[in-house]
Image (cartoon, helix red, strand yellow):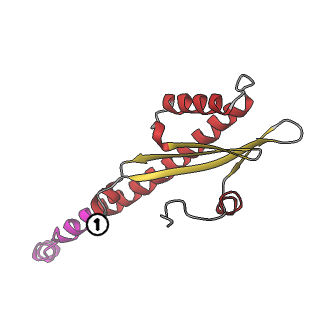
């Protein structure tokens, strides 16, 4: 009798649930990978900028602004950065280094057709004990040093 009861039941589940889960899982995986690349490249650009700025300030052989710029350009080129993506400025007692690096992004490629850009802005100086101090260059510093004006605007 028990055998007849189990033979009459149909234990069948359709594959539609799996057909829906596979694309949803793939989209979630793409978003997670894209966010991971974003975190990685922002951290890498930040660390490389701090490293080069620290090296610039600790070397005693650099005397003029051209020496600093030449050393930083060579060092960033060794790290794989584009020389046009590096900006070094000397403001008061600070050396300000701004770097950027573009990287492939699946979401950026699908939505806008462009790569994403990781940016880092740091300022460095010597303190009163001749020690190197490196800080992040914030928007507040931008207003203090540059007056908060946008340089891309055309003035008549």
Residue 91 inside the magenta-drawn segment: no
Q: Main secondary structure of the magenta part?
A: helix
Q: x and y percent of residue 156 in the render?
A: 49, 67
Quadrant placement of the N terminus? bottom left
What secondary structure is marked by label 1? helix
Instruction: Name the image quarter holding residue 59.
Output: top right
Compared with 3, 94 (above or below) is above
Compared with 9, 15 (above or below) is above
Q: 33 or 140, which lies in front?
A: 140
Compared with 85, 71 (above or below) is above
| 67 lies left or right of 33 | right
Q: Residue at position x 46%, y 53% from top?
A: 38
Q: x and y percent of residue 20 in the render?
A: 22, 69
| Magenta extent | 1-24
Instruction: Name the image quarter holding residue 116.
Output: bottom left
Residue to which mark 1 is pinned: 24
Q: x and y percent of residue 82 in the render?
A: 45, 38
């Amino acid at each position: 009798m028990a055998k007849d009861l189990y033979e009459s039941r149909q234990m069948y589940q359709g594959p539609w649930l799996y057909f829906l889960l596979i694309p949803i899982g793939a989209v979630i995986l793409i978003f997670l990978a894209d966010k991971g690349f974003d975190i990685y490249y922002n951290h890498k650009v930040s660390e490389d900028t701090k490293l080069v700025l620290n090296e610039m300030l600790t070397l005693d052989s650099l005397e003029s602004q051209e020496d600093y710029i030449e050393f930083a350009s060579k060092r960033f080129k060794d790290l794989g950065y584009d020389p046009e993506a590096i900006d070094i400025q000397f403001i008061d007692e600070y050396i300000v280094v701004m770097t950027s690096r573009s990287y492939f992004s699946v979401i950026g490629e699908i939505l806008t057709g462009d790569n994403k850009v990781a940016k880092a802005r740091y300022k460095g100086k010597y303190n009163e004990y001749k020690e190197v101090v490196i800080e992040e260059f914030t928007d507040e510093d931008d207003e203090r040093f540059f007056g908060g004006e946008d340089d891309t605007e055309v003035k008549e």
